[in-house]
Amino acid sequence: MPQVSIARGAALRALGFGLAVALSTGAMAQQGPPAMPVATMVVNEQPWTSTIPAIGLLESVRGVDVSAATAGLVTNIAFESGARVKAGQVLVELDTSVEQAELRNSEADLPRLQAEYDRQRDLAARGFAAQAKLQEARANYDAQLARIATLRAIIERRVVTAPFDGVLGIRLVDKGQYLQAGTRIANLQDLSAMRARFIVSQRDLANITVGQPLRVTVDAYPDQAFAGAITAIEPRVDVQSGVVQVQAEIPNADSRLRPGMFARLEIVLPERRNVLAVPTIAVSYNLYGESLYVVREGKAGPDGKPTLTAERVTVKTGEQQDGLVVVLEGLKSGDRIVTLGQLRLQNGAAVTLADDSGLPPRTTLPRY
């Protein structure tokens, strides 16, 4: 009998433990998983200026490889690498000792030839000299003038000067070096303004005009936009690709932009409209489409406040600017969307509203 009582007591305790576990599991099932904290925002219409994106290559308004026009020995270098120079400033001087000597000799003989020409002209006027003598004296005098002018031009070409204001590159010659005609001395760039050449589709041709503003960004300064304007549009459309060549000019007073930089351009269209725009990080991009989470209100909970759930909504997006993307379909004004914390959500998950602090960061995802 005692053994039967012990067995019956053990069975009752096991049954009680099982009931407690079942009741606890049922309570947890009714309660559901905990609500996830997310950052949200209410979507409202806002002004939006459309743009036409393009990719271009920057070049200076004026740039040239400075070179020697004639061959000669370098006797003087009057600049350093990276120097700013003015138009006409002397950069390099070549040896002109032979030409200088010939010039002095020719100039010294000029008064004699002029005197002979004046004498023959006076005699011919009085009828005491033949016309042939006068013509010979005139020819000798003119030939000497031409020789002097030639020597002066040769000497002038032996002095290499800056053709315009700008910044010099690295010096490529040394004093005492013999230069051939055309030898590069240094690169000179006018950095006061940059030009960008790019292409746009012919379907956008009706939306662009000369003088139209645009924004330019480069990898060196990703957070800064440089203002520019269209200066020329190619009158011919490429028959094979259907694109149009466009040229823009960007002021560059601080010389931050440099030739050869790749640039992202946005041609600003004059039309301005109201759109629904959301942060790009709020949208999930994948091969099957684009979506985001909208916070929906449910029945009031025990605390009297409405329960909040996240509903995954498929959307259609459009243009992107400054971290925002236009939502064309799938949202309406006044919807509250999840901006941070959506990576941990599933459709219908319970959420609580929180600010951005304490939530895991998320970078902008690329568009497919």
Image: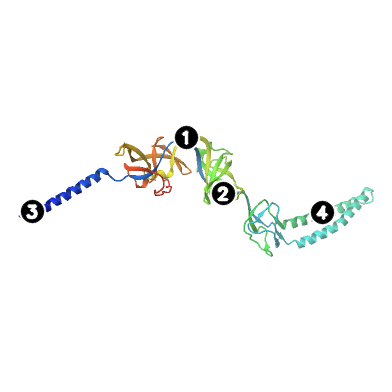
Earlier residue among tags 2 and 1: 2
Earlier residue among tags 1 and 3: 3
Calculate the distance from the C-alpha at mark 1 to the C-alpha at mark 4. 77 Å
Q: Is residue 51 above or below residue 165?
A: above
Q: Is residue 87 above or below residue 45?
A: below
Which one is in front, 287 or 365?
365
Crowding around mark 3 (Cα neighbors within 10 Å: few <14, some 14 to 19, many 20+) is few
Calculate the distance from the C-alpha at mark 2 to the C-alpha at mark 1. 33 Å
Tell me which corner region of the image, top left, top right, bottom left or bottom right, holds residue 309: top left
Crowding around mark 1 (Cα neighbors within 10 Å: few <14, some 14 to 19, many 20+) is few
Q: Which mark is residue 5?
A: 3
Q: Indicate the amino acid at tag 4.
A: Leu
Q: Residue furthest left?
A: 1
Q: Indicate the amino acid at tag 1.
A: Asn
- Residue behind mark 1: 274
- Residue behind mark 4: 145
Secondary element type, mark 1: strand
